[in-house]
Amino acid sequence: MDKGEKEFLDNFRAEDYKRPSVTADIVIFTLDEDNDLNILLINRKGYPFKDHWALPGGFLQVDEESTDETAERELYEETGINNVFLKQLYTFSKPDRDPRTHVISVAYTALIPKSKLTIKAGDDAKDARLFKIKYDIDGINFTNSDLTLTEKDLAFDHKEIIRTAITRIRGRIDYEPDAFELLKDKSEFTIYELKCIHESIKNETLDTANFRKSFIRNYLNTGFCVDLGRKCKNTGKRAAELYAVNE
């Protein structure tokens, strides 16, 4: 650096400027045995929003890590989940989104097969569970075997983060290979399995013939997937062809 820049930095006083806190929040989606879209939520142990359900996440350690590293660390600390691909979603920065102070949240999404999830509540959480995502006229409900939550039950602005995540994934699923991350086995799957994932994310029934044509055009003909040249073993009248992601 030149002399002028060095002099400027030597005299710069960071304390003259208010600093917001920074967090990372993670939206984890998976499919259950019924092919319903599920989301991972944690029950907060402390204030604010004590006993409320929220997305896993936490504060960035200043001068020590990036927001990507914060997301990975917090996800592991609060749920025991690690080694997953996190995709940055959006930055939420409204001044009043957290009652403690001005907190900027960098949100992430991940799509993970349920078989790869070993969920446990960490130090900052009383509980961690998967909830089915259900839609009605009033918005989104989150349900499991013994608990039903509405969007109003969520902490902070996590309702907005979840809605943004769903909208974003629905918007890109037709031209980006996100859905393949939810396959039980990328080395052996059927078009029907992939179609079920698309339908769960979009919350709509898709035409089988059109979906097959789209799969062949966008993924098989481009080399992203390969035809294994064999069919799955099932009890149906017509066995389905097997495909694999071309890793």
Image (cartoon, rainbow, N blue to C red):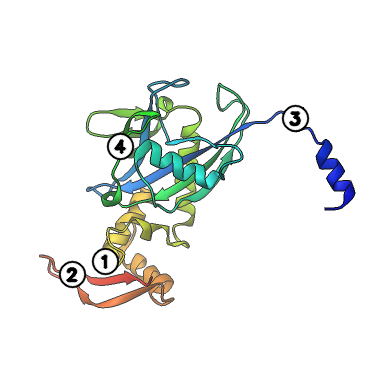
Q: Are marks 2 and 1 in contact (CB under 8 Å)?
A: yes
Residue 28 appears in the rendering: yes
Q: Are marks 4 and 1 in contact (CB under 8 Å)?
A: no
**Amino acid type of the residue tagged 1 in the rendering:** Thr
**Distance CA(mark 2)–CA(mark 3):** 63 Å
Residue assigned mark 1:
190
Label 4 vs 3, first from the N-terminus? 3
Dot 1 crowding, Cα within 10 Å, few <14, some 14–19, many 20+: some
**Amino acid type of the residue tagged 3 in the rendering:** Tyr
Q: Is residue 181 left or right of residue 19?
A: left
Q: Which mark is residue 120?
A: 4
Residue assigned mark 2:
232
Label 2 vs 3, first from the N-terminus? 3
**Considering the numbered disc 3 on the image, is that residue within a helix, a strand or a loop?**
loop
Q: Which tag is nearer the camera, tag 4 or tag 1?
A: 4
Residue 204 appears in the rendering: no
Q: Which tag is nearer the camera, tag 4 or tag 2?
A: 4
Residue assigned mark 3:
17
